[in-house]
Image (cartoon, helix red, strand yellow):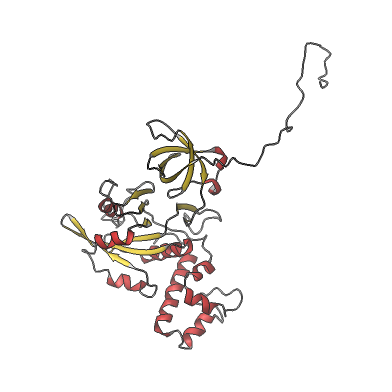
Amino acid sequence: MRDTGTDDARVRVRPNRRGSRPRTKVRPEYPDALGAMVLGVDRGRYHLLTDDGTGLVAVKARELGRGERGAVVVGDHVGVVGDVSGRKDTLARIVRVDERSSVLRRSSEDGDAAGAERVIVANADQLVVVVAAAEPEPRPRLVDRCLVAAYDAGMDPLICVTKADLADPREFLARYDALAVPAVVTAARVERIEGLHELRDRLADRTSVLVGHSGVGKSTLVNALVPDADRATGQVNAVTGRGRHTSSSAVALALPEGGWAIDTPGVRSFGLQHVDPEDLLAAFDDLAEIATDCPRGCTHAQDAPDCALDQWVQSGAAGDAGAARLLSFRRLLASRQAAQPGG
């Protein structure tokens, strides 16, 4: 016993054992954890579909940690333990997040401090950029930013134009001819959506994320693709030309033809400060090969001195198609570097 400054025999002091048993950094592996996919997240509760087809609700285990490293998002494949029966008022526990094949990120604004970006969806292989031909007017800048995010995540982009019954989308889509981005055009008809069959074919057996401004008809599309989805739809403000947010969180919905459609809340900005310009260039195989002759530190921007991409175009070797792709690449690069949020 240690000296406490008293000689009272009735006083007993426990020895200081703090630190005698250091905490281990080795986490349990849970080899018997049941596999599941995250379909939705709601205030700390994770809605899952297990590999055996059981729907259940779970919480995240403390040992997963906080911040992005321990984040669990829609599309994640996880391991769960505990009560995995799926009965009402039961909770399982997520103890493992499997390695992701892709991660779609965005920053709240390009002016935010480093690290402000967040993961939206994991393990998707296709990004569907939904834009209206009118009401609201198409905003090419947001589409450009979404394409940059898709290229950075290694996802295939697809442009889906809605409300083609209100305006001709051909002039808008011509902006993306040089990028060879596939497009699907839909139009509202009496009790049906024209062009929906082609969109179904594009989504079948894939995990697709639908992203777009509020009011473009994204939730209407989802309800048509998945009849029992029951996603809320809204109207466009006649004064501002903007829609209101009708989807409050991302949710993964099983498609009747196979595959998944992940509906996301409407966005008004898509920050890209986490995207390295070199990673964007890597998405353009032909340009990346020419850029190997650029001087060290070349930004490949319009005003970059001695850029090999300019020399390639000026020599005529690029042809009209190559010159158009360079202009498109630089437009996306400028979108990545822009300081203001929005579309």
For this view, does 285 lie left or right of residue 173?
right
Q: Residue at x 34, y 68 (%)?
A: 182
Q: Is residue 247 visible?
A: yes
Extreme residue in the left direction: 190
Q: Is residue 337 above or below residue 24?
A: below
Number of numbered tags placed on the structure image: 0
Residue that appears at 74% across and 32% down: 20
For the N terminus, the image quarter is: top right
Nearer to us in this view, 113 or 247: 247
Position of the C terminus by quadrant:
bottom left
Q: Residue furthest bottom?
A: 315
Q: Quadrant of residue 210?
A: bottom left
Report which quarter residue 293 is drawn in. bottom right
Q: Nearer the viewer, residue 83 or 238?
A: 83
Q: Position of residue 174 (x, y in %)?
A: 32, 73
Q: Is residue 136 visible?
A: no
Q: Quadrant of residue 142?
A: bottom left
- Asked if residue 108 lies left or right of residue 217, the reply is right
x then y, percent, for residue 240: 30, 56
In x, y percent, where is residue 80?
48, 40
Q: Residue at x 51, y 80 (%)?
A: 309
52, above or below 270, in the image: above
Residue plotted at (37% across, 69% down): 181
- Above or below for 272 versus 13: below
